[in-house]
Structures are given as C-alpha cells and as structure tokens.
Image (cartoon, coloured by chain):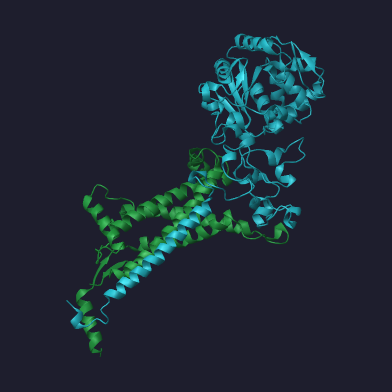
Amino acid sequence: MFRRASAGGVNKTNEGDTPMTDTFYEVLRRQGITRRSFLKFCSLTATSLGLGSAFAPKIAHALETKPRTPVIWLHGLECTCCSESFIRSAHPLTKDVVLSMLSLDYDDTLMAAAGHQAEAILEEVKRKYKGNYILAVEGNPPLNEDGMFCIQSGRPFIEKLKETAADCKAIISWGSCASWGCVQAAKPNPTRATPVHKVIFDKPIIKVPGCPPIAEVMTAVVTYMLTFDKLPELDRQGRPKMFYGQRIHDKCYRRPHFDAGQFVEQWDDDQARMGYCLYKMGCKGPTTYNACSTVRWNEGVSFPIQSGHGCIGCSEDGFWDKGSFYDRVTDIKQFGVEANADTVGATAAGVVGASIAAHAAVTALARARQKTGIDTPKGED
Amino acid sequence: MLAEQDQFEAERSARMVKAVYVYEAPLRLWHWINALAITVLAITGYFIGLPLPSVPGEASDSFLMGYIRFAHFAAAYIFAIGFIGRLYWACVGNHHARQIFILPVWNMTWWSEVFYELRWYLFLVKEPKKYVGHNPLAQLMMFLFFTIGAVYMICTGFALYGEGLGEGSWASQMFGWVMTAVGGNSMQVHSWHRLGMWVTVSFAAVHIYAAIREDIMSRQSLISTMISGWRMFKD
C-alpha cells in the first residue's frame, strides 16, 4: 500500500494490489468522484484530444468497463520537471482522475514506499501484469562508463530500464530527456545520455517532448492510451499528432504581426510593449511543434510568447545545440566556430567576389600586354 | 561603301566566323526565367531570415512579410517546376541539353580537358579550347553547383514549406524526410537552406563573370548564345 499526491495536497490511499478487474470508474467512485463530474471529465478529455463530442460517451464507456492498466513510471537522468508539470494538470478533476485511474503502481517520486519495499513493488508489477503494463519513462539512461552516471537501487539505470521495458505493453517517453536527450545530451554529452528510442527497439514508443511537456497534453495522452487501448496517431518523429501536429507559429496569437512585418527589435522597445512578433528576437515558434499556443500553461493562463519572450523550442530535438535562443539566423556548429549561415555565406560570397575582381584585373593586364592594336593585314598570321 | 579597314574586317569575318545552333528555344526561355526566379528567391529569402525594419500602424493594414513570403514561394514553385521542365528537355532536347545532368566521369580525355581549362583560368596557357556547348570545367561546375544545388534547395525549401502547409500536405509527404535526415529539428534545415542561398549567390557571380570573360577572351559568343541560341566562333 502506498500513497499518491492528489488535488488539494491530500494524500489518498489506494490498494496497491488492486486486481485487474477493477475498472477506472469504480476506482473513481470509490474516491468520491460523482458520476456528473466523471462525465464532465470524459467530454473535456474528448475535446482536448480533438475527438469531438461523440467520443465522450465512448470514453465514459471505456472507463466504466475496462480494467485499469498499471503504469510504471521510471526516472532516469532528469530534473523531475515532467512530474512537476504532470501533477499540475489543469482540467478540472484531471489531477484526481489521472492519478487514480492511472494505476501508478511504481513512481519513486510520488510513491511512499522506498528502498527494498519499492523495488519489490516493481518486481511484483512486472510479474503480475507481464506484457500488460505501460512504462512511462522520465529522463534517459546515460550509457558512458557502463551507465555509471545514473545509479538506482545499486545498479545502472539502463539495466532497470531494459528489464522493465522487456515486459511492458508500450512506452511513453516523457519530456525532451526521454524523447531526444535534452540538456544532459548537449554537446559534448560527457555521460552519453541517450534517448529511450535509441536503447529500446522492440516496443511501441510514444514521445511526448517538451521541457516539460504541457500537463494537459500528458494527461490526455495517458487517457487516450488507457481508454482506447492503443497509441494515438503519431507523426514522423513518433509524437502524438493531436498535440504536435502544428508549430507554435501556426497558432500563435502574434502571427498577424509576423505577416504584417511588425517585429520587436529590442526587448525594451515600443514594439515589445505593443506585443509585436518576437521573430527577430530569435523566437523558435516557426520551428517548434507543440501545443503551447493553443493549450497554454498553468490552467491556460499564458505561454512564453504571451509573456513577452520568444519560444526557445524546448520540445525540439537538440534545441540546446542549435545556436542562440535570441538569434533568428543561428550558428551552425558544424563549422566549428561560432558562425551562422550569413557569416559563412557572406564570407564565401565576398571571397568569390574579390577573386572575380582580381581575376578580371589579371585578365585585363594579360590582354593589354598581348594586344596588337587595330586588326590589320600585317597582324594576320 | 566601306572603308578599306572595315572592308578587310568584313571579309576576314565572313571567312572565319562559324556558327552552331546550340541552345533551343525552350532551354533559353527556361534559363532566363530561372535566372529571374533565383534573383527573387535570394532577395526574398534573405529578408525572410532577417526581416526588414518593422512596419508601423495596425497589423491589419500591412502584409509586408506575407508578400515577401508569397514572392518567395511563388518563385520557388516556378524554379522547381522549371527544373522539372528542364529535366524533361534534357530527355527530348539536343545533346547539349543533357550536359549539366550527365558528366562523362569515366572519360579521361574529358578530365584532362577540365584541367586544361583550369590552367587557362590560372593564366597558365595562352589559348582556351573552344567548345560548342559548355567547356568541361564549366560543365563540372554547372553540375556541382547548379544541378546538385537546385535539387538541394528544392528539397530543403519544400521541406520547410511543408511545415507551413502542415502535416499530411503534399510537401510534407514528399520532402518531410529532410527534417528527419538532419536530426528532426527544422531550425537546422533553415540554417542549411540559407547557406545554400549563399552558395547559389556565389555560383551566380562566378557564372556571370565567366560568361562575360569567355565572351571576350575565348573569341566565341556566350551571352548572345543564350539569347539567340547560336554559338559564334570568331576565328
């Protein structure tokens, strides 16, 4: 038996060994959630998943009839911002609902058990629900020095990850760490922090990148997987299309200023006060796939651009290695020096131009020296 | 009645000038449309990355960035469709039309002539060889910087364009692999696409300079050939 954090900071208890026959709905009702609230949650979730109102009863039905799916939540090299985000989900009830219906059987941050007791639960879930649990991974395994940079319960995290992944149904890669590697994988990546999909190859993996991902996105993804018993539709890079199908730029409320050609030129200028587009300040909205400009953060209060700072592209692969957050034309690291396309290109164009001028001058000289003057019969040979 | 001097020159020319029809009409038309498209693409592309100073007034009154991007995308379509048309012409046109697509890399004579041309440009030989089509060095440069360059710019460009059209659009379907190929972050594609612009600008400068220079120095027509189609040999 272990405790979980919940809505009002009240810790509820739940049976750790709840049998698979328990449905989500039963668990919810046992926690004092009314049917009315439950149905509200279903329709909200259907809407946030972009499924339309017809799906609300389907979600309700699934939650009423399906047995809970246990979730094991592992933490590798990370900062726990994903967990912090997750427990602040803003949909009314989601905090309660997801934390209860998600049979979070193992999450070393949220669970009360510790030490051998905690590890025993992990073993038990793996045995009892073999091939039937979802593995959520926050953070990533470092591979250098045989994985010694992240030791859990006395052994490298990579071992724990591989063992747990072996019997799971599917993997959720929470956040940019598990999805791409994030800051700990920034060049030169001394610990060789490696994203989950480059270590586990034989399981379906859904990436929910972001540093952290938006809470509502996280809960909605989990809800989708639990209710429909399958992964949501993924894009080319393995992210759920419903939240990562568009760029920040595509739905940004400052987009009209971009199209009009109205930009913030400096952080403290009038344009900044008037809320113009932050493109020139290095906003990565045009290259970042996430739902910030639609779902927003902290119960829909705001998101970085709305607060006057450009997007830094935290949900994109290698965002820390793609040059300054404050330049639009950013450095290309491949050249080994701090140079962007314009520096490299304009230098090359300048060298070519100077060469042309020099070549033309030499040509003119050589020609002047050879010149025989007006073509006359004598000159013909 | 011509002056004695002019009369001599006229006779001499009449004897010496030879002309060959090299570039057929569709190819010439394509060349100049393409040149215009590249000019528009380079200028608008530059200002998409580093936009012009802000426009004052209400956002609803202006559409500057929108027009710049529209010009870029329109020119890009013309460039890309023109390139496809040019590929078609390489199949059905005369053999000169195939030069910039196929290099005779196994032909050692061709390679030696590449180096001969290189020596000509380095002032190491006095007289250039004359060619009806491209000289071997020019052919090599055209292939490396124009043909490969155009494919590169079309792929990276439409990959970026596909981001705006959205997932599932034709551009995303056809060119989305570019994003994955560079590691998934499209910021990288923006940078590399911009670098491609600078390569193209440099190439255009060399291309124009070489054409003017050869027109004067190697006593054969180059610039007028791309207008009339006829290559004139002056001696």
Lateral position of residue A321 relative to residue A14, left or right: left
Taking the spot 30% from the left edge, 71% from the top edge, the residue there is: A366
Q: Where A257 sits versus A30, above or below?
A: below
Give residue A203's quadrant in the image: top right
Taking the spot 32% from the left edge, 52% from the top edge, the residue there is: B91
Give residue A244's quadrant in the image: top right
Colour for chain A in the figure: cyan
The x, y position of residue B19, in whole percent, is 25, 69
Q: Where A237 sits versus A330, above or below?
A: above
The quadrant the C terminus of chain A occupies is bottom left
Q: Nearer the viewer, residue A234 or A213?
A: A213
The x, y position of residue A164, in whole percent, is 58, 16
The x, y position of residue B225, in whole percent, is 33, 67
In the image, farthest residue toward the left:
A381
Lateral position of residue A335 relative to residue A290, left or right: left
Q: Is residue A268 visible?
A: yes
Q: Nearer the viewer, residue A74 or A66?
A: A74
Q: Nearer the viewer, residue A239 or B142?
A: B142
Lateral position of residue B105 relative to residue A91, left or right: left
Lateral position of residue B4 relative to residue B171, left or right: left
Give the number of callouts: 0
The x, y position of residue A15, in whole percent, is 74, 10
Colour for chain B in the figure: green
Q: Is residue A240 visible?
A: no
The quadrant the N terminus of chain A occupies is top right
